[in-house]
Image (cartoon, helix red, strand yellow):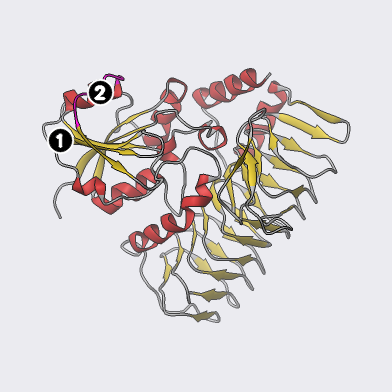
Amino acid sequence: MTDPAPAIFFDDAKGKLAPLRDLRPMSEVRTGALTTRERICRTFNLSTAALFVQTPHTTIAAELVGPDIPINVVPEIDPPLLVINARCPLPLDVFEQLEPGQAATEAESGDLVAARVTADQARALLAGDPPDLDTATIEDRVLISRPWHVRTFRDACIDADLPLLSQSLPATTDPAGCCHFGDHPLLIAQGATIFPASIFDTTNGAIAIHPGATVRPGATIVGPASIGPGSTVLDKAFIKANTAVGPVCKVAGEIGGTIIQAHSNKGHDGHLGDAWLGEWVNLGAGTTNSNLLNTYGEVTAVAEPGGPRERTGETFFGCVLGDHVKAAISTRIMTGSIVHTGAMWAATAPITGCVDRFAWATDAGIKPYRTDRFLDVMRTSMGRRKIEPSDAYTARVRALAEISK
């Protein structure tokens, strides 16, 4: 295999995407079984030469990707760089087709999707002084600009991911005492634990079980699906198609068409469908969301507090729950709800519409979550997974809380 070609992923800060990127750059959002950057790099054998992120993300981005990937610096590289908009989750053919000096934009928005440029041209481009490039337009929507677009691109992303995962996860013989039917592969990593009486349906797509994952007795998983490293599918869970559970999560009940970033718990009965969950989300027992209107019509949603209600283009769309969202037992989440970072819902009324960051909702009303109290709870919940939030992470959370007051 040839050496990976260099690529730079940039977050242009466009769109209304706060629940997805409050605590991570867009390249690191899990948009399928993989993050956007993982998917594109694996598909085209690319190395990450640098990330360009917005200023509030500079330090936490460096912590996420490690010291080997420069942040907001174009390295001295001789071959042309492929510069990719981190809001583009799909591995587009145009990434391979671009010649040096060429670029592609999205027709609807006019936003840059990708360009193949020299290092000097990349510096100018990312500094807001784009060089003169031969530019083509992409007629289809290819950039995420609203939270519900993770639902729009979900199936195509998962379909792209599972063949990539098959390169590292072996197709295995059926686990002892389990039922497996369907012609697509069942990919089970060494070190995963599969209990007897589990059911795997690969009729319509592969299933990937990653290292350290556990599937408890009586669980049913329908492909295409992915269960991330260290995650647990609890007893009698029903994991439906197009679900991708990130690392170190616990899931139970009925879950379908849902992407979970990482470190989140839905450990009890209740329905979760056509949803995206960030990190450190916890859903109390019996929490249930609706993903279909009684009218069977197009779902509308509000991306940010005070914003307009917009058409999503989706008939099935449940919710987007940002990082550190907590829901009390028996919480109802209505179709198309968008809940921003750090909100805590303990009201008997259902979640509906758009819930602001760090909202503390009870039957007495909604008030701001006290920042110091939130940080105490955050440290406790992360500590249960033996993770200590860094100073940079804590500072970013505190800054978001201050913005929301």
In the picture as drawn, the residue positioned furthest to the left comes out as 78
Q: Whole-Å distance between the Cαs marked 1 and 2? A: 16 Å
- Residue occupied by mark 1: 80
Determine if residue 344 is in view: yes
Image quadrant in which the N terminus is located: bottom left
- Badge 1, how many Cα within 10 Å: few under 14, some, many 20+? many
**Residue range highlighted in magenta:** 127-133
In the picture as drawn, the residue positioned furthest to the right comes out as 364
- For marks 1 and 2, give the one nearer the viewer: 2
Sooner in the amino-acid sequence: mark 1 or mark 2:
1
Specify whether 17 is left or right of 252: left
- Eyeballing the image, is 332 above or below 125? below
Q: Nearer the viewer, residue 153 or 60?
A: 153
x and y percentages locating residue 239 in the rendered image: 59, 65
**CB within 8 Å, label 1 to label 2:** no
Magenta: main secondary structure equals: loop
x and y percentages locating residue 353 in the rendered image: 70, 39
Determine if residue 75 is in view: no
Q: Nearer the viewer, residue 131 or 66?
A: 131
x and y percentages locating residue 369 in the rendered image: 73, 26
- Residue occupied by mark 2: 130
- Badge 2, how many Cα within 10 Å: few under 14, some, many 20+? few
> Residue 137 occupies which quadrant of the picture?
top left
Q: What type is the residue that disc 2 sits on?
A: Pro
Q: Residue 308: which numbered mark, if any? A: none
x and y percentages locating residue 328 in the rendered image: 78, 44
Q: Which residue is rendered at x = 41% and y = 35% of the image?
A: 109
Q: Secondary structure at mark 2?
A: loop
Magenta residue check for 132: yes
Image quadrant in which the C terminus is located: top right
> Residue 107 occupies which quadrant of the picture?
top left
